[in-house]
Image (cartoon, rainbow, N blue to C red):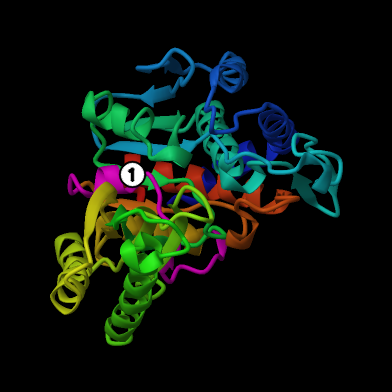
């Protein structure tokens, strides 16, 4: 990249530092808890920002309360780069546990506090302001840059990113997802397999439990066997960038009263698969544990219902998108070695369509979904600088090495 162009872009980003902070603070102070997932007010905050620079705006949705927004600039020639992040957040929990409240936007020792500051309003603010900085810098934008901020990420993405993808509202060549990576380049994340397992028994009086079949007891046997089986298998499986595979028993319900033998018990299970694992195989392994227990115990009766699956991300390290991101990091003196992303993101919707996808965003992963969530302001500005340079490199590939 021409040094003069680089400086013009970075000066434009830096000149917007106070505005970026004010924008992020307003986003954090605007409630967008999911559930219920109403993003109408926070979309208005973004729309007000778009009136300060020339950009085309659309707000697609299939639910009038769960709006998404697309901001586009540049031309139709060349590559199409999509920046995607989410505006919805998890609920705050007990508000009294928050210093100043979950929507305070308070600043203390260089950090901005509030629900969603890190996950992922910091990324969204940085993406919008990077787009504005590029436009105001007056540099060439050879291709098309779209910033897409969505609803519904925290509850599966069907009304947000998946809607955008399935309706072909964007056709990107490259996708950058704004999630908490500490501004590192994440090229891999685990897949998800969410299911409900039900054990069936037979009701009886608690004074004569042998006349019934206790579904809770059967579930206890299943969970003990399943955990041992899975952990043994996981010990032999690794991916160079992501955490190990995992299984979690999230919720359990069963029975009617203490003096009745429970005839039904239900458990939800979250199985995270490595990028090099297969979801169908992961499901089959769990089914095999159930089948083996049924062979050993004629009274054992369990069924699986798959609630949701999510594809992993495993973008090749030699992908042009990864190389562009590494070059942008090197221009800023940031670490360029790719890492893995521990959680799940909306990036899976693009990766499963074989669109090169990476994750980059400000913040520390241990801040997500926590009381007193916060983000370092300097990291947000750093992210905006990184996004702006990356967008220029991708949309003007002839300038990459000049």
Quick one: 337 or 197, which is closer to the camera?
197
Q: In which quarter of the image is residue 39?
A: top right
Above or below, 135 against 276 in this view is above
Q: Which residue is drawn at 75% across and 39% down?
A: 102
Res 396 visible: no
Could you tell whether 47 is left or right of 188 in the image?
Answer: right
The kind of secondary structure element at disc 1 is: strand
Residue 383, percent from left and from top = 57, 49
In the image, taking residue 127 as reference, residue 357 lies left or right, namely left
Residue 300 placement (x, y as % from top left): 23, 67
- For image coordinates 48% across by 46% down, the residue present is 178
Label 1 sits on residue = 175
Q: What stretch is highlighted in magenta?
A: 332-354
Q: Is residue 232 above or below residue 241?
A: below
The reply to whether the magenta stretch includes residue 148 is: no
The residue under the point 59% across, 39% down is 121
> From this viewpoint, is residue 250 visible?
yes
- The answer to whether 230 is drawn above or below residue 123 in the figure is below
Q: Is residue 242 left or right of residue 167?
A: right
Occupied quadrant, residue 78: top left
User: Is residue 74 or residue 189 the one in the foreground?
Assistant: 189
Q: Magenta includes 353?
A: yes
């Amino acid at each position: 990249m021409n040094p003069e162009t680089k400086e013009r872009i970075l000066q434009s980003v830096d000149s917007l530092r106070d505005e970026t902070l004010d924008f992020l603070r307003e986003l954090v102070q605007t409630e967008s808890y999911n559930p219920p997932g109403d993003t109408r007010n926070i979309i208005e905050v973004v729309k007000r920002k778009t009136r300060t620079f020339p950009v085309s705006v659309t707000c697609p949705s299939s639910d009038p309360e769960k709006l998404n927004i697309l901001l586009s600039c540049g031309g139709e020639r060349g590559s199409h780069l999509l920046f995607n992040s989410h505006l919805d957040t998890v609920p705050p929990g007990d508000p009294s546990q928050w210093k100043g409240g979950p929507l305070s936007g308070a600043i203390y020792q260089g950090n901005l506090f509030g629900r969603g500051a890190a996950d992922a309003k910091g990324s969204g603010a940085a993406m919008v302001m990077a787009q504005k900085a590029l436009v105001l810098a007056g540099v060439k934008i050879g291709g098309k840059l779209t910033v897409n901020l969505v609803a519904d990420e925290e509850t599966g993405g069907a009304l947000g990113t998946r809607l955008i993808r399935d309706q072909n509202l964007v056709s990107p060549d490259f996708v950058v997802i704004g999630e908490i990576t500490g501004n590192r380049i994440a090229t891999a994340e685990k897949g998800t397999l969410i299911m409900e397992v039900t054990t069936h028994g037979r009701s009886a009086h608690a004074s004569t439990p042998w006349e019934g079949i206790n579904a809770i007891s059967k579930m206890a046997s299943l969970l003990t066997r399943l955990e041992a089986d899975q952990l043994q298998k996981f010990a032999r499986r690794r991916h160079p960038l992501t955490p190990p595979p995992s299984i979690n028993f999230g919720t359990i319900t069963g029975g009617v009263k203490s003096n009745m033998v429970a005839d039904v018990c239900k458990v939800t299970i979250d199985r995270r698969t490595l990028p090099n694992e297969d979801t169908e195989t992961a499901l089959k392994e769990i089914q095999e544990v159930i089948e083996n227990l049924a062979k050993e115990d004629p009274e054992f009766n369990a069924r699986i219902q798959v609630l949701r699956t999510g594809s992993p991300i495993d973008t090749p390290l030699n992908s042009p998108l990864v190389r562009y991101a590494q070059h942008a990091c090197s221009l800023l003196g940031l670490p360029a070695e790719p890492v893995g992303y521990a959680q799940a993101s909306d990036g899976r919707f693009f990766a499963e369509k074989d669109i090169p996808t990476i994750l980059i965003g400000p913040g520390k992963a241990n801040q997500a979904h926590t009381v007193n969530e916060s983000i370092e302001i300097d990291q947000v500005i750093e992210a905006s600088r990184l996004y702006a340079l990356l967008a220029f490199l991708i949309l003007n590939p002839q300038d990459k090495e000049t």
